[in-house]
Amino acid sequence: MSEVKGDFMIFSGTANPPLAEKVAAYLGRPLNKIDIRHFPDGETFCQIDETVRGRDVFVIQSGNPRPNDAYMELFIIMDALRRGSAARITAVLPYYGYARQDRKDQPRVPITARLVANLLECAGASRVLTMDLHANQIQGFFDIPLDHLHAEPVILKYIRDQHFARPIVVAPDTGGAKTAYAYSRKLATGLAIVAKQRTGDATVDAFSIVGDVKDCNVIMIDDMTATGGTLSAAAKLCRDNGAKSVHAFVSHFPLTDKGAERLMHETQLDELVVTDSIPLRAGFDPSKLPFKLTCLSVAPLIGEAIKRIHSDESVNDLFNHE
């Protein structure tokens, strides 16, 4: 690999242009120019409109919506950059699509999260920058450097600014207990954990809660919600056990049709707080929800990580200080 020359460059795919523009604005520069076209037969073409020879390049592309199209577009962009002699290519994936397919839990099924890692490397990625992976072991799928960001600083600031009376952090399932515990320590609150059983791809039965949520304002922490099943079941259980209010916080919001319907009619939330790692679903109108939907931007977090990667500074230091 050739030596990196000069300042870095930022390109964006078409999956989440608003977030890419916010990142560029945080860094005080425009996005670099790229021509991306989608032909009538479904093929994708791109041309880099600036020289990238010897440059440190970052490509921002979320793995949703339409993860298959988003990833193929990213691979094509990186191939063009590699053939243009970029010195280093960092794939910036605010949301790592296919992260839930991270293990072989049934006969004859793929480990697609690992396959995506292999494809990113083959397409020319020198390193990967992503946020709040569904499972930490996905980091081990890569043979190139991976920087793993957390939306925690952004979410913690928002929670503290609300000054909740009698708050308690709740994990909506046992898999999120470790993350919820970390939040409870930093917020100096109690902790409760919901036990659930998934009864289908989009249905969940929450049947017990460990901890006392009576008369408390619940702060529910999860990494993502697509169908709203886990959050809805956990919120109902908290309400049934006397919770005063339920505020859910998720890093990623890959909303499905079923999820939109459930949030509209079945969810007993007071507020759902998400980040802009994924653009809001096309046609989805948050103003029609029976609760408040808040979207926090992770652009400053990603922008700061890009600066640190380019200057060979620690990214982990972003999370070592309150």
Image (spheres, rainbow, N blue to C red):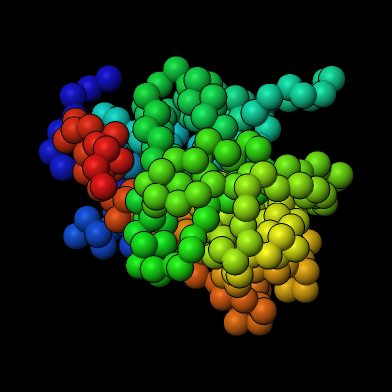
Q: What is the residue that sits farthest to the top in this orientation? A: 143
- The residue at the point 45 percent across, 17 percent down is 143
Residue 59 image position (x, y, % from top left): 38, 44
| In front of the other: 265 or 213 | 213
- The residue at the point 16 percent across, 42 percent down is 7
Decide if residue 69 is on the left or right side of residue 311. right
Residue 26 image position (x, y, % from top left): 25, 59
Q: What is the residue that sits farthest to the left in this orientation? A: 6
- The residue at the point 78 percent across, 61 percent down is 258
Residue 189 image position (x, y, % from top left): 45, 51
- The residue at the point 78 percent across, 69 percent down is 266
Q: Quadrant of residue 220?
A: bottom right
| In front of the other: 283 or 68 | 283
| In front of the other: 250 or 101 | 250
Whether 140 is drawn above or below 247: the answer is above
Whether 197 is drawn above or below 14: the answer is above
Whether 320 is drawn above or below 13: the answer is above
Residue 112 image position (x, y, % from top left): 66, 29
Instruction: Answer yes or no: is residue 302 visible.
Output: yes
| In front of the other: 69 or 51 | 69
Quarter of the rendering occupied by the N terminus: top left
Decide if residue 208 is on the left or right side of residue 192. right
Whether 271 is drawn above or below 318: the answer is below
